[in-house]
Image: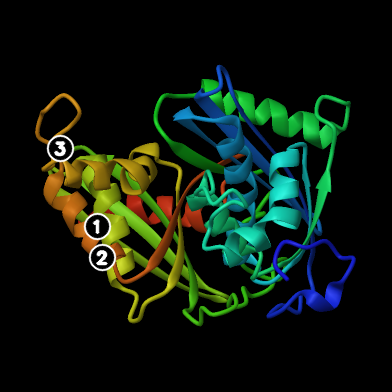
Amino acid sequence: MAGTTHDDPESQIGCAPSRQVDVYTDGGCDPNPGPGGWAAIIHWANQEWVLSGNDPDTTNNRMELLAAGAALAVLEGLLGCCQVDLYTDSQYVRQGITKWIDGWVSRGWRTSAKKPVKNQDLWRALHRLTQSHEVTWHWLKGHAGHPLNERADRLATEARLGGSSRFATLCSRRPHALRRGPGLPDAHHPTGDRRPAVEIYVKASRREERGGWGAVLRQNEHARSLSGNEPQATSNVMLIRGATEALGALRKPCRVILYSDASYLIHGASVWAKKWQAHGWKTTDGKPVSNRAEWEALLEAARPHQVTWLLARGDAAPDDLSRAGELATEAAASGDER
């Protein structure tokens, strides 16, 4: 059953993992409720991924849940079904997923007291993600000196202090950790979702009075390069245009992880654009949103797909993101369009 430990491995369904992954998560607020941050450290083979994010108005429990869910979601997109040892210092998360959740599901997401389950949106997402992996849930005592737990705590604190808008980042701590190639097997389809898994890398450039964009689309070992340019266009417009064109080049609905090192694109697509749309394309100050037409086109291009927007940062940029930057620079300089 979903969310159990390995005491009964036969109870896990729909997953035959061949990859062993360790995940360390943490999250918290100060004050609680209030501004919060979360982080997850993922280790697989000789690779490491670091995820973090924040929310200006949240709770400790939501940050702990989001850390675990984000890690499992990224693994689902990058590696498919995995055998995961997930370490958390939250008894709320561990007890909830291993002891309480089956009762909540059977009662229509109500507690034994017949009250709606708190943080139901995140619990539902986490419950679904456990169907795509075989997860062993470990509890670690917080602030007890475990190196990776302490590191996750520091990353979550840094994320909490890092900004006032909701965001998520993904960092590669080892060279080429996000590269699809000999060091990383093809992504498998998660249970119940047969859509192809695609990675998209987008960057923009501007030279004199011309803007350019570059994108690399990768599915397993196959990569496709796209680029374009426009006179007088800003880098922000080119970022949105590049993401729109790349998504539009997909011939069927896909599971997409879209990477950029530009927070304007990632924050805008994942958080701001839908809020702007809901408020008549006005900012919180009541001003018209810049680049509205481009944002509307991007939302339409993303609509057929399941898109995860990730801000890529790290010691070494993934090869495909570096290539997207080269394409953008060439497009801005040459005036040619491919």
Q: Label 1, secondary structure: give it.
A: helix
Q: Label 2, secondary structure: give it.
A: helix
Mark 2 surroundings: few (<14), some (14-19) or many (≥20) residues within 10 A: some
Q: Is residue 322 above or below residue 28?
A: below
Q: Position of residue 279 (x, y in %)?
A: 15, 40
Residue indicated by mark 1: 298
Mark 3 surroundings: few (<14), some (14-19) or many (≥20) residues within 10 A: few
Q: Are marks 2 and 1 in contact (CB under 8 Å)?
A: yes
Q: Is residue 6 left or right of residue 255?
A: right
Amino acid type at mark 2: Ala
Which label's residue is closer to the chain start, 3 or 2? 3
Q: Position of residue 209 (x, y in %)?
A: 16, 39
Residue indicated by mark 3: 290
Q: Residue at x 20, y 50 (%)?
A: 295
Q: Residue at x 60, y 40 (%)?
A: 314
Q: Nearer the viewer, residue 70 or 322?
A: 70
Q: Is residue 146 above or below residue 320?
A: above
- Locate residue 214: give its quadrant: bottom left
Q: Is residue 159 left or right of residue 131?
A: left
Residue indicated by mark 2: 301
Q: Which mark is residue 103?
A: none
Q: Residue at x 83, y 78 (%)?
A: 10
Q: Position of residue 247 (x, y in %)?
A: 32, 66
Q: Residue at x 42, y 74 (%)?
A: 254
Amino acid type at mark 3: Ser
Q: Nearer the viewer, residue 207 or 98?
A: 98
Q: Are marks 3 and 1 in contact (CB under 8 Å)?
A: no
Label count reads 3
- Locate residue 272: give its quadrant: top left
